[in-house]
Amino acid sequence: MEEILQMSALELSKQIRHGSVSVKEAVEACKKQIQTSEPQVHAYVSMDEKILAHRIKEVEEGIKSGRYTGPLAGVPIAVKDNICTRGQKTTCSSKMLENFVPTYDAQAVKQLEDAGMVILGKTNMDEFAMGSTTETSAFGVTRNPWNPEHVPGGSSGGSCAAVAAGEAVMALGSDTGGSIRQPSAYCGVTGLKPTYGRVSRYGLIAYASSLDQIGPIGKNVKDCAALFEIIAGHDSKDSTSADVPVESYDSLVSGGLSGMRIGIPKEYLAEGCDEEVKKALADAVHTLSKNGAVVEFFSLGMVDYVIPAYYIIACAEASSNLERFDGVKYGYRTPGATELHEMYKKSRAEGFGEEVKRRILLGSFVLSAGYYDAYYMKALRAKGLIKKEFDKAFQKYDCILAPASPTTAPKIGTSLSDPLQMYLSDIYTVAVNLAGLPAVSLPCGMDSRGLPIGMQLIGDCFQEKKILRAAAAYEQLRVEFPKAWAKEEK
């Protein structure tokens, strides 16, 4: 069983397709690790044994018959709980949707199943993806597998913690302002936020529709590239889906560093970035430069406007998207309300958590008469200017190197006491969503407390190949990164 956990997703699938490992054995290895780690980590919110048993049998038969032949066939995967799964609860880790069972699969989930992957269960998250620590979940806090006193990041903290703890070989997350990349950095795994429109949002319960994007989380860059190839592509059910060809994962990660031009924004390493994070990035720059990349500093404009623009736009869209949860058609309904408006108010007050209510109120405020032009329209203009700054940078550079977070994972309980500080921790990630760009986060070191440090490589729109190529090359040069679950076993 331990040998299975050691394998990458691509290695495991190869062994399954060759008959050396069965799908059941792969799933059982993850389940055994779940039994060991889950009481402490709490990465999952639901797992349906009956559906899982049926799926194992279906995939084993499909591999034998030649129906499933892809590079990730048979691989167990976890799915973030804001991505719809037919017949399985999809709660967004909220009391508002605690009993919601979708009647359809998200397009990304359908593509997983068409590729012969096995969904283990649904992972914990910040409620409605609003948070950076996975502490706002209505179903309890997820803990960092490296140190349970620390957060795993958010909002895809459950997915990243599951991969880091060996409770899943891969996972799907969603990224609105860094929700794949930041927890990947905190948990020492690799996460990709694709270009906006690259992966269908059909079946993703919306937080901020112009920013949300589903993406892969894995043990390494090649695994993420292979999962990206599976879930990417045009979907007629999603009006924002881009009709852009998807390259094979082999070509996405090949090419090496020779001749690549990489820029580092000076502003990202200024005051506020932890010294140990700066040191890890400096070591990564040295490795990249020594092996054929041209790395230089440059000034990226509009950095001071990134956080306010993001939170105004995201909260405005959230207040609109969450309007549908009113206790009428589905979701939580307060008991004992005597008239309609009382039911609306009490259902929303009792069904939503504090952070969700805070963002709905902020969004409603910036969209209200008298403030719409002063805040929301200015934020949209700032968003356009931020995109222009990136466009200018990509005329010179193939990709941009940046920290994934100013610090390593904070202790549980420290972030929610100061929401503004929590919002500021997204400084290096939210600009990517505002500009609709792709970015990959991968480990680049450990701090003095034994917590992972992550860096991100940012690319121009639909240039996933460039960032994955650079990330894969760096990963091969880096000393092997330790595994959280292996550390835990010792």
Image: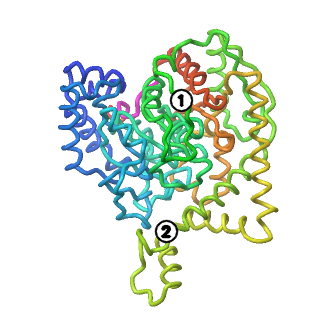
- Which residue is tagged 2? 325
Report whether residue 334 is seen.
yes
- In this figure, which colouring scheme has been used for the structure? rainbow
Q: Is residue 193 magenta?
A: no
Q: Nearer the viewer, residue 468 or 186?
A: 468
Q: Specify few, some or many for label 1: CA neighbours under 10 Å numbering under 14, 14-19, or 20 or more.
A: many
User: In the rendered structure, which amino acid carries the disc numbered 1?
Assistant: Leu
* Residue occupying image coordinates x 50% and y 23%: 247
Q: Which residues are magenta?
A: 481-487
* Residue 171 place in picture, x, y as percent: 40, 39
Locate the C terminus by quadrant.
Answer: top left
Task: Name the residue located 42 percent from the left edge and 76 percent from the top edge.
Answer: 333
Along the viewing direction, whichever of 246 and 412 lies nearer the viewer: 246
Q: Please state if 158 lies on the left or on the right of 15 as rendered.
A: right
The disc labelled 2 sits on which kind of residue?
Answer: Phe
Which residue is at a point 73% across and 53% down the rendered structure image?
308
Quarter of the rendering occupied by the N terminus: top left
Residue at which label 1 appears? 442
Task: Look at the numbered disc 1 and give the secondary structure of its residue.
Answer: strand
Q: Position of residue 277 (x, y in %)?
A: 63, 32
Q: Is residue 271 above or below residue 482?
A: below
Q: Earlier in the sequence, mark 2 or mark 1?
A: 2
Number of residues whose C-alpha sits closer than 10 Å to that of mark 2, classed few (under 14), some (14–19) or many (20 or more): some
Number of marks: 2
